[in-house]
Image (cartoon, rainbow, N blue to C red):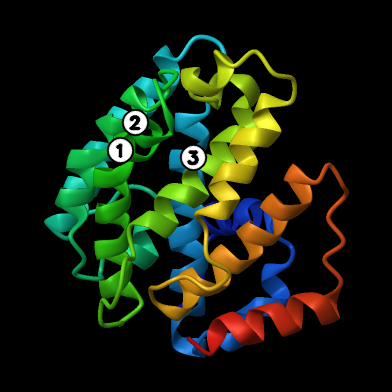
Amino acid sequence: MTTSSALDSFLDKWRTRWPEWSVAEPFVPEAQRLRVVAWFALLKEFDDILNIGGDPTPADAKLAWWGEELRSWAAQRSRHPLGRVLEPLRAPWAELAQTLPDLIDARAVPVDPAQALAALRAYAAAVAAVEAVIFEAAVRGDTTTPVVLQTLAQRLHEAGVAAVPRALLAQGEQDVTQRWGQQLLRDWPARVAGPRPRRLYASLARTRQQAWVQGRELKATPLRTLLRTWWAARG
């Protein structure tokens, strides 16, 4: 499929945010590579809406638009450039659309870690259900929790202390963001369940999370990334 400049701009934004993907991508079947980046670029749009700073009104309106767009994809109609790649795939788009309002609720400071995970569970389950279709993979194991953890980790990186559960804040200790980050990491296995593209993406995200909680710069050399993603790709 040839791509338009509008589509390329969305794909390139995601690739710029995740330059390590150039090393991981050869482990993805060639026929799936475009859809993989398009899908992860769509999830980036949702992450940006979840983690908006300041007045959330424009982001909430954008999220409502995305809900209508995904329902249109279910009827095989699309307006967004990413739809050129994703809409032809008969995934449960309407079911994903139904969970998008959960992203608005998930901006609230959770009472405790359990509530933080529960707030995104329906959304993550819908994401995993779409991935099972577009990545042509049978669902085995818990494919929801890895999506929840990765989404929460991204939120922590972007929103900082606003993403930390009140139960941790109430303890009055310093570095509560790192403590929450460490807790997410403990629950996040080095190799997750799910289709190969999700396993690769989760491996890259977990490596970033490890560097973040240790307060060090990410040193993702091509060789280290290759070995890590090769291991994740094995399943």
Q: Which residue is at a point 74% across and 20% down the rendered structure image? A: 174
* Residue bearing mark 1: 118
* Residue bearing mark 3: 47
Q: Which residue is at a point 34% across and 31% down the rendered structure image? A: 115
16 versus 115 height, above or below = below
Q: Residue 84: image x %, image y %?
A: 36, 62
Closer-to-camera residue (171/217) = 171
Q: Amino acid at mark 3?
A: Asp
Q: Secondary structure at mark 2?
A: helix
Image quadrant where residue 155 sits: top right
87 versus 177 height, above or below = below
What whole-number distance in Å separates the C-alpha atoms at marks 1 and 2?
5 Å
Q: Looking at the image, which residue sits at the far top?
A: 55
Q: Residues within 10 Å of mark 3 (few under 14, many from 20)?
A: some
Query: Badges 3 and 2: C-beta atoms under 8 Å apart?
Result: no
117 versus 7 height, above or below = above
Q: Amino acid at mark 1?
A: Ala
59 versus 210 height, above or below = above
Query: Badges 1 and 2: C-beta atoms under 8 Å apart?
Result: yes
Q: Secondary structure at mark 1?
A: helix
* Residue bearing mark 2: 115
Q: Which residue is at a point 32% across and 50% down the rendered structure image? A: 124
Closer-to-camera residue (72/199) = 199
Q: Residue 130: image x %, image y %?
A: 27, 63
- Residue 165 can be seen, yes or no: yes
Q: Which residue is at a point 72% across and 54% down the rendered structure image? A: 210
Query: Badges 3 and 1: C-beta atoms under 8 Å apart?
Result: no
Closer-to-camera residue (200/25) = 200
User: In the rendered view, does 3 fall on the left or right side of 108?
Assistant: right
Q: Residue 152: image x %, image y %?
A: 50, 40
User: In the rendered view, does 133 fall on the left or right side of 223?
Assistant: left
Image quadrant where residue 204 sits: bottom right
